[in-house]
Amino acid sequence: MDISVIVPLYNEAESLPELAEWIERVMDENGLSYEVLFINDGSTDDSWQVIKDLHKRNPRLKGVAFRRNYGKSPALNTGFDRARGNVVITMDADLQDSPDEIPALYRMITQEGYDLVSGWKKKRYDPLSKTIPTKLFNATARRVSGIHNLHDFNCGLKAYRREVIKHIEVYGDMHRYVPYLAKNAGFTRIGEKEVKHQARKYGTTKFGLDRFVNGYLDLLTLWFQAKFGVKPMHFFGLLGSLMFLLGFVAVIVVGALKLYNMYSGNSYRLVTDSPYFYLSLTSMLLGTQLFLAGFLGELIIRHSNDRNHYEIGEEITDDAPALNAPNHADELKAAVPAEKVRVEAE
């Protein structure tokens, strides 16, 4: 199969028929074999019914429905686990991403040798309250990640070589940093394509300003994992050792000053009367705790089997229009045991 298109969505029933028809037309015109995976992230409108109707018309249009809203990252990760195409395209369901970009993105992966290609909406139809924070956010992400050729980390329209999505794990709100996750996993051929940004036709945006605050915290987490995720002792051990050494030297200085004044006949006070003594002890205690934190971090394998455990109510597959699927976590782990590698272990 040439392409898997993954479309995470939340309450986008109005736009889905038009989007599906648009994707089908583009694929047919370019002679590409494909599947479309609609990941319904707990929508409260008729999105799931629309997806089931679309599947009856075209079996290549499939879907997964979460029982509740988990977020865009879990939706993408679920789509990544199920994708079968040699190239995987992700795009939003609100019609702001144009399916006409798919053939060019496909060629950049298959012919130009990129591992990942991210869209860049150079001309945006968003208010200043959204575009200005976005520019600041992207500037920070470029500097921290070291991926200086990307202008828009958070663009939903991206293309991936299949190997990339099978070696990264998208959780929490990490969908903003998929290029950074790919780089940390060893996929360094990351490119960018200027894409057309269209004004929203239906509904309203599902993201608020809090995403920028959360985005910076997630970026800090990724930076720390990339630098010290495999060797936490390099951070905690070094910082703890420095604090302990500083506190130890300070205690020696406080005691030496008392002994000097005592034998010189000068006035002196008890060591325990000096605030510097307690500051020194505090520094030594903190240093010891940080060192132990680094040591324990070295002993603990940092991953959880339940990190990507999502309750799925229904799933549309090739075999049947709708299957009851309470949970597919175990099947997913068995399906790609050798390929699914967490970023922290790279």
Image (cartoon, rainbow, N blue to C red):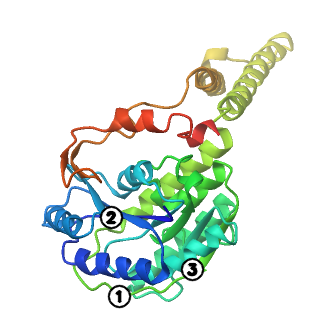
Q: Secondary structure at mark 3?
A: helix
Q: Is residue 163 above or below residue 24?
A: above
Give amino acid for label 3. Ala
| Residue position marked by numbered label 1 in the rendering | 199
Residues at badges 1 and 2 in contact (C-beta under 8 Å)? Answer: no
Instruction: Identify the residue at horizontal 49%, vertical 81% (top origin).
Output: 30
- Mark 1, Cα crowd under 10 Å, few <14 / some 14-19 / many 20+, is few
Q: Is residue 276 above or below residue 188?
A: above
Q: Is residue 336 above or below residue 24?
A: above
Q: Earlier in the sequence, mark 1 or mark 2?
A: 2
Is label 1 or label 3 in front?
Answer: 3
Q: Earlier in the sequence, mark 2 or mark 3?
A: 2
Q: Earlier in the sequence, mark 1 or mark 3?
A: 3
- Mark 2, Cα crowd under 10 Å, few <14 / some 14-19 / many 20+, is some
Q: Nearer the viewer, residue 302 or 102?
A: 102
| Residue position marked by numbered label 2 in the rendering | 60
Give amino acid for label 1. Ala
How far apart are labels 1 and 2 at the CA level? 28 Å
- Mark 3, Cα crowd under 10 Å, few <14 / some 14-19 / many 20+, is few
Left or right placement of residue 163 versus residue 80 in this view: right
Place of residue 154 in the rendered image (x, y in percent of width and height, measured from the top left)? 48, 68
Residues at badges 2 and 3 in contact (C-beta under 8 Å)? Answer: no
| Residue position marked by numbered label 3 in the rendering | 104
Residue 39 visible here: no
Residues at badges 1 and 3 in contact (C-beta under 8 Å)? Answer: no
